[in-house]
């Protein structure tokens, strides 16, 4: 159950992270944000990132072996990165229709998935 909860929290966390880091790039298309300055955009992104941390911290706490979870620190990090790139790919396809996924992006994604595989190999 802790493994499942960890992955769900990481998915939610990375969704908020992607929105905080890249969502503001779409603000230019929204009428309410056209007059906002950089500091306002930063404040909005920080507000979104707060929710990232609300899920990221419990994901790591519950998932970490030394706290009774199933994952080593390295496994947690590599899993988080794989989830992060997955969420980013979905986000970029849905919201940035001008972005195209090329063969080199696919290769990079496959290498990240391989990193997860190798991180979970028993010593």
Image (tube, rainbow, N blue to C red):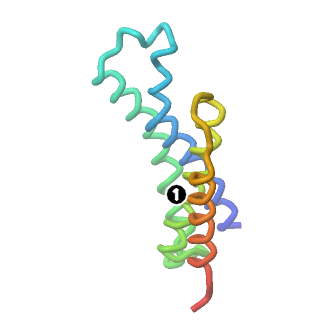
Q: Is residue 31 left or right of residue 15?
A: left
Residue 110 location in percent, x, y? 63, 63
- Residue under the point 62% across and 84% down: 121
Q: Identify the residue at the far bottom of this view.
A: 123
Where's the C terminus, which quadrant? Answer: bottom right
Q: Is residue 3 left or right of residue 27?
A: right
Q: Is residue 46 left or right of residue 118?
A: left
Residue 28 location in percent, x, y? 45, 16
The answer to whether residue 35 of the structure is visible from this angle is: yes
- Residue under the point 62% across and 28% down: 97
Where's the N terminus, which quadrant? Answer: bottom right
The answer to whether residue 9 of the structure is visible from this angle is: no
Q: Is residue 35 above or below residue 63?
A: above
Q: Is residue 23 above or below residue 117?
A: above
Q: Identify the residue at the far front of this view.
A: 103
Q: Residues within 10 Å of mark 1 (few under 14, many from 20)?
A: some
- Residue under the point 38% across and 35% down: 46
Determine the image quadrant of residue 120. Answer: bottom right
Q: Is residue 15 above or below residue 82?
A: above
Q: Where is mark 1, residue-wise?
A: 58
Number of numbered discs visible in the structure rendering: 1
Determine the image quadrant of residue 89. Answer: top right
- Residue under the point 53% across and 40% down: 16
Q: Secondary structure at mark 1?
A: helix
Observer-nearest residue: 93 or 121?
Answer: 93
Residue 114 location in percent, x, y? 61, 71
């Amino acid at each position: 159950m802790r493994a499942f909860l960890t992955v769900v929290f990481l998915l939610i966390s990375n969704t908020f992270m992607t929105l905080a880091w890249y969502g503001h790039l779409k603000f230019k298309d929204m009428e309410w944000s056209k007059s906002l300055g950089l500091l306002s955009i930063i404040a909005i992104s920080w507000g979104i990132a707060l929710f990232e941390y609300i899920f990221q911290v419990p994901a790591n706490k519950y998932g970490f072996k030394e706290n009774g979870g199933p994952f080593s620190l390295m496994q947690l990090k590599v899993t988080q990165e794989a989830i992060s790139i997955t969420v980013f790919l979905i986000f970029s396809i849905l919201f940035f229709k001008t972005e195209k996924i090329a063969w080199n992006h696919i290769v990079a994604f496959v290498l990240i998935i391989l990193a997860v595989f190798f991180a979970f190999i028993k010593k």
